[in-house]
């Protein structure tokens, strides 16, 4: 009886581990997204202090690191202390008017710290996504959860990404917030941490940038 119980527990554990691995990888699996044929010119990183690069020197933020990984121009539209509602106010000037090819959205940290209801944050981000999609840009939504930290936003962002057919980039701060050598304070990475964030974001968006390039190349060849 004891052996049967042990086998059963092992099966349950294996199933749980497989499920967690699948859930984590789901955000990186290439799937159909809207505006894959975007004709924008720039990657725009739109967010708060984590996008701005708080905790590192100028030029050590993740958009700067990302710009070295791609030949597409990258614009840092991050602003310290920004909430999702404040982001909505400036999205037209800082994002929609900048010829966006891909908009990488990262908000929620300041909403959480200022005790803004999660439902309001999600609504604001959904409006951002809709505005960017209407501008014919691709959209990627960044999740900053790390373990139990911000985990409630992770599930909501994943669901929203599937519904809107946009790229989901999970857990970009994983193993950064628990590593003193990669962070500048309890929430913000340092230069080394931002490089890791950029690498994770690039890994998630690269397949779609390649697909977009292939589509536009074929269209241009067809017109010749």
Image (cartoon, grey):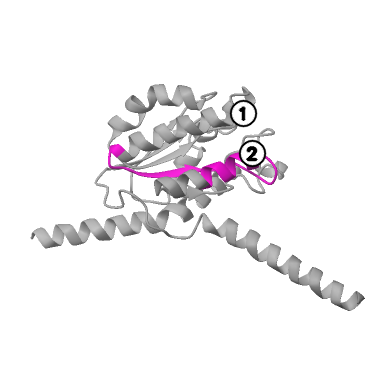
Q: Which residues are magenta?
A: 134-158
What x and y, as percent, mark residue 6? 85, 73
Name the residue carrying label 2.
150
Give the side of residue 84 with respect to residue 191, left or right: left
Sequence order check, earlier mark of 2 and 1: 1
The quarter holding residue 102 reads top left
As drawn, the label of residue 55 is none
The quarter holding residue 63 reads top left
Q: Does the magenta run of residues contain 152?
A: yes
Residue 65 showing in the rendered view: no
- Give the Cα separation between the discs numbered 2 and 1: 8 Å
Q: Secondary structure at mark 1?
A: helix
Q: Residue at x 33, y 40 (%)?
A: 133
Find the residue positioned furthest to the left.
Answer: 224
Q: Which corner quadrant holds the C terminus? A: bottom left
Residue 214 showing in the rendered view: yes
Total numbered circles: 2
Give the side of residue 66 with respect to residue 191, left or right: left
Label 2 with label 1: CB-CB less than 8 Å: yes
As drawn, the label of residue 112 is 1
Q: Secondary structure at mark 2?
A: loop
């Amino acid at each position: 009886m004891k052996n049967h119980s042990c086998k059963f527990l092992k099966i349950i554990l294996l199933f749980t581990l497989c499920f967690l691995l699948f859930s984590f990888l789901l955000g990186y699996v290439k799937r159909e997204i809207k505006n894959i044929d975007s004709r924008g010119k720039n990657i725009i990183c739109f967010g708060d202090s984590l996008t701005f690069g708080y905790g590192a020197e100028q030029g050590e933020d993740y958009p700067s690191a990302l710009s070295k990984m791609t030949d597409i121009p990258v614009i840092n539209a991050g602003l310290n202390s920004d909430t999702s509602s404040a982001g909505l106010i400036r999205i037209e000037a800082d994002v929609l008017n900048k010829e966006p090819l891909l908009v990488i959205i990262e908000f929620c940290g300041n909403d959480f710290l200022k005790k803004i209801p999660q439902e309001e944050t999600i609504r604001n981000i959904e409006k951002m996504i809709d505005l960017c999609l209407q501008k014919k840009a691709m959209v990627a939504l960044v999740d900053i959860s790390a373990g139990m930290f911000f985990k409630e936003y992770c599930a909501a962002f994943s669901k929203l990404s599937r519904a809107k057919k946009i790229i989901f980039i999970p857990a970009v701060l994983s193993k950064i917030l628990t590593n003193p050598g990669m962070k500048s304070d309890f929430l913000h990475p340092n230069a080394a941490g931002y490089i890791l964030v950029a690498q994770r974001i690039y890994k998630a968006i690269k397949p779609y940038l390649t697909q977009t390039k292939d589509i536009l190349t074929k269209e241009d060849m067809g017109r010749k």
